[in-house]
Every structure is written in C-alpha cells, then in structure tokens.
Amino acid sequence: MHNLYPSGNIIELRPRLHTFDRRRPRSINAGLTCLALTKHNATDKALLVSDNGDATRAVWCPKVMFQIEPGEMPFDFIVATMSSAFAQQKGLGPRFVDRTGWSAEKIAALACVERIAATKRLQYRGFHQPLPFPGRNAFA
C-alpha cells in the first residue's frame, strides 16, 4: 500500500509573495504635447499657426497658452509645447505636410523641427533613449 502523506525529508517551497509592485516609469507631464508648427502671422498676444503649413487652415492661438522652444528656426517654423487638450481644441496635431514645391533647405528645416518636437513628446511620455554603444560600461 502506498503512503499518501508526504515524507519528512521533502521540503515544500511556497511561492514568494511580493510585498510591493515593481515601480513603473511614469510620464513627466502626461497632459503636455510638443508640436512642429508654421507661424503665419503674429501680434503682441497671439500667433497665427498651422500644423501643416497651409495658411487657410491656420488658427489664432494666444501666446500664454504655449511655450515656444528657444532658438532661431528657419522658414517661420516653431516648436511649441502646449497642453494636449488645448491642441485638440484648436485642431492641432502632428500631421503630414505636403512638401511639393518646397526647396531642399525648407524640407531639411522641417525635418529638423519635426525631430525636435517628436523627441520632446517622447520625453513628456517618460521615454528615454537607450545609451549608444558601448553604453555606460565602456571602460569596465
């Protein structure tokens, strides 16, 4: 007859219970976005901007509602940080820009501005670029 009880030399290991969850990376400012915009006109208190370079679809935005990245951008391009709700309300977002008829310099300037805006958006979402090769253990 077989013994149904465990023998004395077998040790039961219980699964380890975690008393805390792993810390998840949080976004810095979840309500912010950064956009590459074209400035069409400006006053003391507002800017006429569009997200696709089309002056007929441009909207007036008060300057107090967004922050413009410092630095001189060519061809009236700006990189603006604003709340996501404000951008949605004004109909602004990262869009496809029709580049037909543009010079190579203007296309390169737009690509640079879009790259800056995309990097800032990822930064606001809490994403960090990995270290380049060989990484932080280069001299270990």
Image (cartoon, helix red, strand yellow):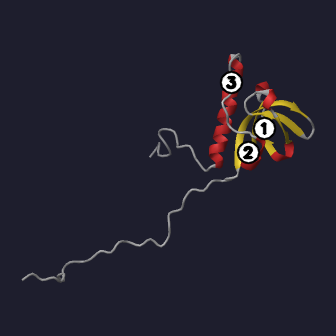
Answer whether residue 37 is visible to the viewer in this image: yes
Tell me the residue at 38%/72% (across/down).
16
Between disc 2 and disc 1, whose residue precedes?
A: 1
Residue 83 at x, y = what percent? 74, 48
Badge 3 is on which residue?
98
Q: Amino acid at mark 1?
A: Pro
Q: Residue at x 70, y 52 (%)?
A: 31
State the image coordinates of residue 80 (x, y, percent, origin top left).
Answer: 76, 40
- Determine whether, in the image, residue 18 is placed left or right of residue 110: left
Q: Secondary structure at mark 2?
A: helix
Kind of residue at disc 2? Gln
Q: Quadrant of the N terminus?
A: bottom left
Which residue is label 2 attached to? Answer: 88
Q: Which residue is identified by label 1?
A: 70
Which of the 4 image quadrants contains residue 98?
top right
Q: Callout 3: helix, strand or loop?
A: loop
Q: Nearer the viewer, residue 87 or 69?
A: 87
